[in-house]
Amino acid sequence: MSDFEKELQDMADNVADQLEEQLPTIDEQKRIAAELKKLEEAGELTPEVLEKYFGKFNNKTDAPIH
């Protein structure tokens, strides 16, 4: 494996590890989805609410994850 391929693999492994640490469990995802659906039906789903739930997944770097 070339140095370039090894570096790419290391980057992919690091991103995968970071994503796994951040992802909520299935039960938490279901709870979040139900709450967001309820807020949407009430007309209270705002960008601020979405930021609360999904902002932590917004990677501040421009490095692609794929």
Image: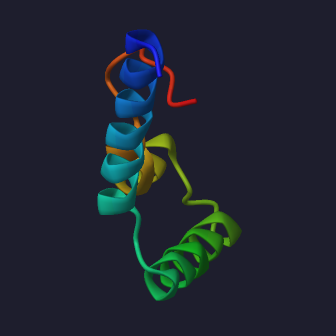
Looking at the image, which residue sits at the far right? Answer: 41
Where 28 falls versus 22 (above or below)? below
Q: How is the image coloured?
A: rainbow
From the top left corner, tell me how far across and down residue 33 is, in percent: 59, 74
- Number of marks present in the image shown: 0
Which x, y percent locates residue 11? 37, 28
Q: What residue lies at 42% left-to-right and 47% top-to-bottom?
A: 16
Q: Residue at x 57, y 69 (%)?
A: 36
- Percent position (x, y) of residue 9? 44, 31
- For the C terminus, the quadrant is top right
Question: Could you tell me which residue is drawn at 43 percent across and 50 percent down?
Answer: 54
Q: Is residue 44 left or right of residue 12?
A: right
Vertical placement of 12 versus 18: above or below?
Answer: above
Foreground of the two, 58 or 33:
58
Q: Residue at x 38, y 60 (%)?
A: 20
In the current view of this chain or complex, which residue is farthest to the bottom? 27
Q: Which one is nearer the viewer's eye here, 66 or 60?
A: 66
State the image quarter where residue 21 is shown: bottom left
Q: Is residue 4 left or right of residue 10?
A: right
Q: Residue lying furthest front in this view?
A: 1
In screen coordinates, is 13 left or right of 41? left
In the depicted structure, whether residue 49 falls above or below residue 1 = below
Q: Position of residue 27 (x, y in %)?
A: 49, 88
| Relative depth, front residue between 44 and 51 | 51
